[in-house]
Amino acid sequence: MSLQTQLNSFVLRVAEEFNTVKGRTGTLTALTTTDKSSLVAAINELKAAIVTAVMIDDLQVSTTTTYSSNKVVTLLDALKADILGGADPAYDTLLELQQALQNDQSGIAALTSAIDKRVRFDAAQTLTVLEQQQARTNIGAVAATDIGDVATDFVAIFEAALV
């Protein structure tokens, strides 16, 4: 089943649910919010409650707290140290890495060969069917034939289903 077919089914199902909800719009008294004047007012009340519930707390991790910018920088510095794995600080720049690679030519040919086999995004590239399939697998992509017609007007489908 193509992505187009799946989206088409989804849009029709959303329209069906929308029609059901549209038929119930007169029962705002069932809302658990204090402001029952409209759905927009109730949503705004919920949004305000969520925004004020977020607190900055660098000491504990939970779904209702977030880190300060200082804590984020500290965590990023720790991650950087983990990635470098205790390497000399001089190797913290691209220039030092370039110089180190130029001084050790033994692995350069293998690296160049591997780079030549990468999937390019900046230029046209001719790949065999197997290479295309492997490239899609590597990046989690699907084939164009699996997507369907990208020009499908889902708004028109939705509006037609609202009848």
Image (tube, grey):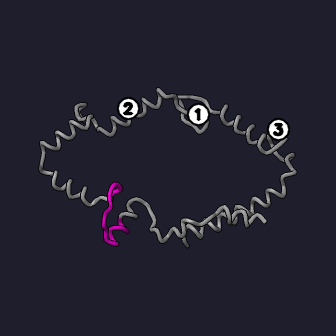
The residue at 51%/67% (across/down) is 147
> Can you tell which of label 2 and label 3 is closer to the viewer?
3
Q: Specify which label sits upstream in the sequence, 2 or 3.
A: 3
Find the distance from the CA under tag 2 to the CA under tag 3.
45 Å
Residue 111 in percent (x, y) is at 21, 53
Find the distance from the CA under tag 3 to the CA under tag 1.
26 Å
The residue at 75%/37% (across/down) is 45
Q: Which mark is residue 12?
A: none
Q: Depth check: give the residue in front, 103 or 62.
A: 103
Disc 2 target residue: 77
Residue 55 in percent (x, y) is at 61, 30
Q: Quadrant of residue 102?
A: top left
Q: Secondary structure at mark 2?
A: helix
Which amino acid is tagged 2? Asp
Q: Depth check: give the residue in front, 88 or 10.
A: 10
Q: Which residues are magenta?
A: 120-134
Q: Is residue 126 magenta?
A: yes
